[in-house]
Amino acid sequence: MIATTSSTDDTTTPAPGAGGPRKSFQWRGLFNPSPIAHLLNKLGLGFFVPYVRLAAGDEPQKQVRQILIDILLPGLAMCLFFAFWAVCAKHVKTDSTRIPTPAETWSAWQGMQAFAADQAVKESEFGDKMEKLAAVWDKQAQAAKDAGDAAKAAASAERAESYRSKEYAGPPTFYHQIGTSLITVTIGFIAATLIAIPLGILCGLNRYFFIALNPLVQIFKPVSPLAWLPIVFVFVTALYDPPASSHLFGRAMFISAGTVTLCSLWPTLINTAFGVAGIDKDHLNVARVLKLSWFKQLTSIILPSALPLIFTGLRLSLGVGWMVLIAADMLAQNPGLGKFVWDTFQNGSTESMAQIVVAVFAIGIIGFFLDRIMFALQRLVTFEDRAI
Amino acid sequence: MAILNIRNAGKSFGFGALKQDILSNLNLSINEGEFLAIVGPSGVGKTTLINLLVGLLQPDTGSVEFEGKPITGPSQERALVFQTYALLPWFTVKQNVLLAVSQVHRHLSRAEQSAHADRYIEMVNLSHASFKRPSELSGGMRQRVSVARALAMNPKVLLLDEPLGALDALTRATLQDEFVNIWKTARTTMVLVTNDPEEALLTADRVIPLRPGPPSTLGPEFLVPFDRPRRDPAIRESAEFIDLRVQITDYLRASMPRLSADDEAYAFPDLSPPPVVKPTGWRAKVRKLLAHFPEESDPT
Ligand SMILES: Nc1ncnc2c1ncn2[C@@H]1O[C@H](COP(=O)(O)OP(=O)(O)O)[C@@H](O)[C@H]1O
Ligand SMILES: [Mg+2]
């Protein structure tokens, strides 16, 4: 090839074979914190960066200052909040119940854990018992088979099987309820994603499609979950007839999930449409000059550049979905956190109020983690384009 | 033999009272194998003109022809190096080039396509950065990826839209020489659009100014008689070279809106820095306390 003059602009890159990045100064710390810090920032865990840098011995004073700020300020706010809560607990009361104190809430949480542990023990005991009964019938079946009585052997084997398949029918624990809620929101969210992303892409690509759909989107977007629920109820009842034995994937779960879908669809749809419509014009011109096929254009230009906004939409959608789910659970009597809050409230004692406060914290913390996960995904698919 | 022809072409943007003729009365014939430079200040319509040549835009009047046939849209025979580089940030250097290669050289096997891409990445001296993404590259390196992508299409015409506009002087000089070398090696027709008369004279066979309007139109051609390389002071500081540069600059300036001292008296406002207010009381105390810890500068 041609011999060009040596390049003067390669300041960011070493000559080939120079081995590793050029170092402008000698790093004297324990280890190089930059890659870990970069990863943490990318995953939305920037909170931990000062700890990593402190561990590496990188400007310890600055890191200590940052850590103190990061801990002290939220700590202060938290203390004020607990003080306010304690005051409320002392003064806000009705005839039958009152706001529980932080201590009561803590012991309610421990009670709920103990109950769950107790149920777990009972469940495994129940399982052992059924297994023992089944073993007895297995033996009889074997004996009948040896005796040549095929009919009796089959009947005994069936008995054994029926014992084995028996499920423990204790009351659901708090963890079961959390599990049910998570499954429900996942179903609803996945359904919303599968509807919203393709529709959003079509709206973003095709002006006419967007003009056609826009009024419907604008009208249905602000509708409250409580209004959707009866409609979803009719649809699910008409279309889905679950086997009586299935207590997990019952109608109530799909009514809840359907409501979540209808409410959480819109942020993803709108963000996808804007992401696709707002693609850099030069990138589209590249596609035109190269005469990329429709499919290649979609996979190599449209989707990658719309992904950050699509994930922004998904993150908003999941937030909305989780919020809506609690209300939908309450109304649809889906055995998740919403139903738990409602049933416990019907109980009316101070102890049950404490359990509700526990549920409030659980809902908040789970929602926070769901958001963090989506945030990390969003960061992972975002490519910086520091143009020029 | 002319490969590209513009005949009486014009282009306007907007509609109604806001309609503005950006380009009009364009006449140009570009010879096969030549290195042509078009010079004009920013905003005259250089990008618009090059988009007409590529086929991304259609003229409102007149016609633009490639090999005797009117241009109806972009073609892989006319590659464009975008003013903004237009690299895809989610692809590596190699993937960016491969996107073009796999599109233009469909008959090649995957391995051959990959080798083809590598060849052009090497031609612009970027083999060592093949697996980097655009955000990890300097401006000059990105520019060269963009050139490699265009060259790898093996176009009959390579159009460069202000390729060095955003780069520093040293990088510009390097890449100017590189363009000349590429032109000599690849033997394509090159059309370089630039805002710098000196750059045009250092690289091209023929320089045509785009006279500012509106509407803008192409001026007379200036033939550049010097041998290459022209960076040698013997050429670059010769009276002929300087004379050509002055002629082109004067031609462009003649039609630019004037801003001279006698047009209007400019009175500079009396600017003095705002007074410094020293913090007192508890603010000062907090500052003193915080001064024990140096301020964190956000790394992201
Ligand atoms: N798509 C467009 N719509 C309206 N005006 C445009 C469009 N493209 C360019 N222009 C106008 O045309 C003029 C020339 O633009 P351009 O060709 O980009 O100039 P240059 O590349 O020489 O800087 C500018 O005044 C710009 O505002
Ligand atoms: Mg331009």
Image (tube, rainbow, N blue to C red):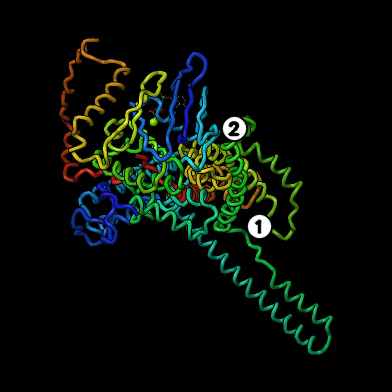
Report which residue position mark 1 lands on. A248
Identified at 53% across, 39% down, the residue is A276
The amino acid sitting under disc 1 is: Leu
Q: Quadrant of the N terminus of chain A?
A: bottom left
Specify the quadrant of the image occupied by residue B224: top left
Identified at 41% across, 31% down, the residue is B47
* Residue A146: mark: none
Indicate the position of residue A100 as horizontal and vertical percent values: 47, 46
| Left or right of residue A112: residue A252 | right
Image quadrant, ligand 1? top left
Q: What is the chain identity of the residue bearing mark 2?
A: A
Point out the frontmost of discs 1 and 2.
Answer: 2
Q: Are marks 1 and 2 in contact (CB under 8 Å)?
A: no
Number of other residues with Cα within 10 Å of mark 2, as a class: few under 14, some 14 to 19, many 20 or more = few
Between B137 and B172, which is closer to the camera in this rendering? B172
Between A315 and A168, which is closer to the camera in this rendering? A315
The amino acid sitting under disc 2 is: Arg
How much space separates mark 1 and mark 2, taking CA atoms?
A: 43 Å
* Residue A207: mark: 2
Q: Where B90 sits versus B49, above or below?
A: below
Residue at the front extreme of this rendering:
B1
Identified at 44% across, 30% down, the residue is B29
Q: Say if residue B287 shows up in the picture.
A: yes
